[in-house]
Amino acid sequence: MDSLTANVPLLLFLIVGTIAVASSILVVAMRNPVHSALFLLVTFLCVAMLFIMRGADFVGAVQVLVYAGGIMVLFLFVVMLINVRSLPHERMTSPFLLGGLAVGAAIFVLFATIVRTGAYHDEVNRPDLLRSTSTHITETVRAADGTVATRHVVRHHIVGNSEAVGSALYQDYLVPFEVASLFLLVAMIGAIVIGKRELSALEEETVPDFILERMETEADVKEVVNA
Amino acid sequence: MTHTFVPILLMLLFAVVVAGTILGLNSVIGRHQRNPSKLAPYESGVPLLDQNRKRMNVRFYQIAMLFILFDIEAAFLYPWAVIYRGASHGPSGLFLFTEMLLFIALLGVGYVYVWKKKAFDWK
């Protein structure tokens, strides 16, 4: 029983990770773009679960709120904006297959090198650091022979993950946070500019086709009756 | 730490099992009748008049985009609120408050711009 409960996180990781990878493959393999979008939603939710299992609760919650809630809507609207009613049954492979595989392999190698040795590799395997805030203190130490030295100490306090993110974001990374608001502002203006193009009279308020068809048939009927 | 999420996981499993059981039982012991009225889009609704997949107005996209931007703004407020509660009496309370005020003011400029451009009006 003990070995079973100890292996539950690993088992859960394997299940969720497999679902994430499988659904992300299905995103590109599906013919219907709406189905692709729904598999993308499954991928987002699985990634959120992986974040939470790693101890990054806040990122997991934001993944659900922003990605599964917002970005998903955006994707569905893009699918509806471009008229993709019937895709021709073209082959799944394309001349770009080899190039695409090469780019994919290159990005994989990049990720692998970063995760293995880089700054994001968590060498001591201490997920509790994700939920700790740090205070930097300079202590004066009086040694036994009377010399006074200053020592820089970093104290970690274990708090919640949201609190850790908050104190890092709003105290240590003040400028990037304020720049983020500028990014949001730019995106807001961009969204307005997209819709700014005035519709021409032809596009605006067009009568749906089915009504036009009906009107034509009614006119035909009247012609026949009058004749 | 992540043990607090176990109830959510259990609820997820429960939902999947219940939904799967109901659908499975339905397909096993239910009768399968396929007649034209059952295959209609809605059993007692209006039949489809036009194509269901049409190009939509770009304004839907615009509204969705604005929704996401303000959604992200709200997501930034959560960790701020968590640490502001503890720091509001200390010296960093004013700092945190000003910082968030600046953030909201910058986005407020965007809000006023969007408002003046009548993006919220649905003609």
Image: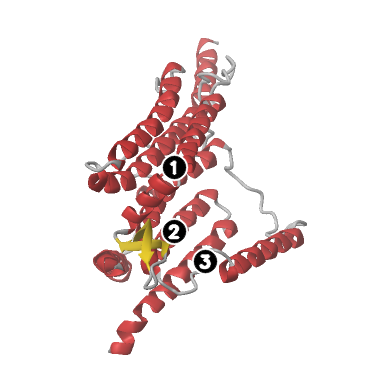
x%, y% of residue B70?
39, 35
Which structural element holds mark 2? helix
Separation of residues labelled 3 and 1 (CA atoms) = 35 Å
What residue does disc 1 label?
A: A174
Which structural element holds mark 3? helix
User: What chain letter is assigned to the residue under label 3?
Assistant: A
Along the line of sight, the residue nearer the viewer: B43 or A40: A40
What residue does disc 3 label?
A: A21
**In this rendering, would B83 be left or right of B119?**
left
Number of labelled discs? 3
Disc 1 residue type? Leu
Disc 3 residue type? Val
Task: Determine which of the numbered discs, if any, sits on residue A42 in the image.
Answer: 2
Separation of residues labelled 1 and 2 (CA atoms) = 34 Å
Mark 1 vs mark 2: in front: 1
**In this rendering, would A77 be left or right of B80?**
right
- What residue is drawn where x is 52% and y is 66%? A21
x%, y% of residue A27?
54, 57
User: What chain letter is assigned to the residue under label 2?
Assistant: A
Q: Quadrant of residue A131?
A: bottom left
Q: Do marks 3 and 1 both belong to one polypeptide chain?
A: yes
- What residue is drawn where x is 53% and y is 16%? A219
